Image (cartoon, grey):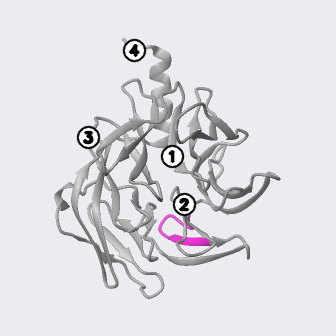
Amino acid sequence: MKNPLMVICMLLAFKSFGQAATEILLFDLELKKGGVIISNPKNITNHKGYDNQPSFHPDQPVIYYSSFSEEGRSDIKYYNYKTGETKSLTNTEEREYSPTLTPDKQFVSCIIQRDNGAQDLGKYPVEGGEALTILNDRIVGYHVWTDNSHVALFILGKENKPNTLHYFLLPTRSDTIIAENVGRSLHQVPGENAFSFIHKVTANKWFIKKFNPRKSEISVIASTLPNREDICWTPDGKIIISDDTKIFWMDPKTDKTWKEVQINTGAEQVKGVTRLMVSADGKKMTVVVAE
């Protein structure tokens, strides 16, 4: 029989992050002016249970992701798509989510969910080692770096209050609330000093918006597909989103509507799609699908 405390921790983890059994597919990606094409999917996790939240290293053929153990603990693993090797970055009594390479490329930052209910922002050295805590005085859900000192934070609301988007300056601990009722998808906008987020204005109106820190301005980029909050950017400025079984793209500089991504091979594996991510060179794309 499993330790009762462990079972409680597993239930808390599922409640907090809504985990389901998922796999990560890695596609070849071709970006054209008038289209987006993916092909040759490979299941890079092939592991029963939760494998999710992939992120690419910008310079190396490495994908970081979160993966549940049989004990219900989420650790950070990384997959090298040149060698086909998978290794563990963490093996802890905590639960780590949303692995993201820091701008200095020396650490992998992540959300550390603790047994007391805390969800801290921390980081691990890329070569492995002990965690360093960055923030431990708020419940952090997701994050994106804008530079070494600034980070955007999705903060979970307490006592039925809405989730909020914060822009945080680490050296001075200056904290600015950008918006309420935001989604989990936070990304740097390619070629701009800005980051994008999903603003759930009403139950039926969700928008992709961006925040320019230098001007302290928010602007609307596009509407999402109905009730879909997971997007990613390509290096040439396209946005990719899914409706669950199909994948769509838009170039917000020229388009007003979503267009379907051409899936040359592997379309039958695209189901229950959530998070998507594109490599910095625009040649690979990860798609998280239902197991």
Farthest top residue in view: 1
Q: Residue at x 73, y 40 (%)?
A: 137
Toward the viewer: 217 or 157? 217
The relative height of residue 268 versus residue 111 in the rendered view (above or below) is: below
Mark 1 or mark 4: which comes first in sequence? 4
Q: Position of residue 121 (x, y in %)?
A: 63, 43
Marks 3 & 4, CB-CB < 8 Å contact:
no
Mark 2–mark 3 Cα distance, whole angstroms, equals: 26 Å
SS of the residue under disc 1: strand
Q: Secondary structure at mark 3?
A: loop
| Badge 3 amino acid | Asn
Question: Which residue is tagged 2?
Answer: 186
Regarding mark 4 in the picture, which secondary structure is present there? loop
Q: Three-letter amino acid code at disc 2? A: Leu
What is the C-alpha distance between the residues marked 1 and 2? Answer: 13 Å
Mark 1 or 4: the one toward you: 1
The CA distance from mark 2 to mark 4 is 36 Å
Residue bearing mark 4: 2
Percent position (x, y) of residue 150? 70, 58
Q: Amino acid at mark 4?
A: Lys
Visible residue check, residue 21: no
Could you say whether the residue bearing mark 2 is in a helix, strand or loop?
A: loop
Pair 2/3: label in front: 3
Q: Quadrant of the C terminus?
A: top left
Q: Which residues are magenta?
A: 199-210
Query: Mark 3 highlights which residue?
Result: 46
